[in-house]
Amino acid sequence: MKKKIELIVMSMKNSPRLPRLIRRLKKFNLKYKIFYGFNGNKQSEVNEVYSHYNKKEVIHRTGRELGFNEMSAVYTAIRVYKYAKKKKLDNIIMMMDDSYPSFLFKEWVDKKICFTGSKIIGLQCFPAGFLKKKNESVLNGKVKIHQAKTHLFNSNCYQITSDAIKKKISISKGKIVGNGDWPINFKKNNITMLQTLPFLAYPDDKGFSFITKDRDKLEQTSFKKIRKLLYKFFGIKFSNTIFNFFRIPYYIFFIPFLLRKYKNFDYYVEYYFEKYFYKLINPIFNFYIDVENISYLKSSYPSDLKKFAKYRVFDN
């Protein structure tokens, strides 16, 4: 039986990033469907988004409220999942409009690489996180698929199965329960996270982000300003090494949880503790692949994306 897979692009109607992605997809002759988020210009849209906002659960997981653009992005994903469920799609491929796909992405879509079970397959990934070294090959060995050892920030461009979609809708009850970087526990709910290497797309927002503006209003930005100064004087890689020296004990000794910044224990363990625990021990045992260490390597990207490979700032 032929597998039903669709490529979905999530964007805003006034996004300056969308035309570039559309040109790329048309060049690759790929079919796609666009889901537009609500920008809040209409009160009816505001009301609809807020009607799906579980404020208590969001604060319980993330330690803060979400801005409207953050809520709108998550709600757009929920709408896509419900669409996929209604259409009985086997898999969908989700792209944010700042994704820049490679020629291997085109081949992946053309070959209709399909998965079963409750799985999310990242086609791109931000630090931090760890992958198991054991892998399976697809596309005649051009792409390796690794299972995640920890939570991953791979929600910018990913493939998700129908079973995983059903679980996400069921667990969240179709509500906004956290930010877009996977606001549910995967291990607890038996959802497998996978990651392609090389990455099949690159996040290139051209310095524009609706969500960053929200986060800057709701999060403490004083540390970010200090961090930018340190990056300027000492470089990103050296500065991040120093930051990790403080981050590791901060997170593995559960300080944010004890201070009640984060109140959901299982979520904290999966989202924060495990990453920094393996950040501590992996340099000694080298059991796993550290996403932070490979995210800037040219070998982590297909030939047409190698130009993007560089050490950069990630706010996750």
Image (cartoon, rainbow, N blue to C red):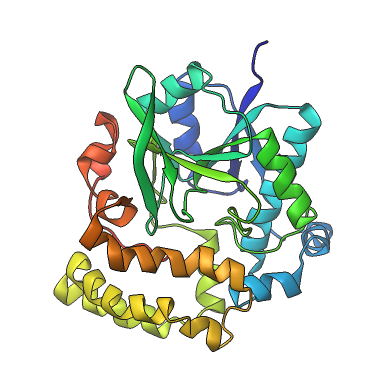
Left or right, 55 with reference to 195: right
Most distant residue in the top direction = 1
Residue drawn at (49%, 37%) of the image? 19
Residue drawn at (50%, 82%) of the image? 256
Where residue 305 sits, quadrant-wise, is: top left
Residue drawn at (59%, 49%) of the image? 14
Q: Position of residue 159 (x, y in %)?
A: 55, 36
User: Compared to 284, does 7 lie above or below?
Assistant: above
Where residue 278 sits, quadrant-wise, is: bottom left
Left or right, 271 with reference to 283: right
User: Compared to 111, does 288 lie above or below?
Assistant: below
Most distant residue in the bottom direction = 259
Q: Position of residue 281 (x, y in %)?
A: 29, 65
Most distant residue in the front direction = 285
- Pick the quarter of the image with the C terminus: bottom left
Where residue 3 sits, quadrant-wise, is: top right
Q: Position of residue 299 (x, y in %)?
A: 22, 38
The number of callouts visible is 0
Q: Position of residue 143 (x, y in %)?
A: 35, 28
- Pick the quarter of the image with the N terminus: top right
Left or right, 294 with reference to 59: left
User: Compared to 197, does 247 lie above or below?
Assistant: below
Viewer-proximal residue among 32 and 270:
270
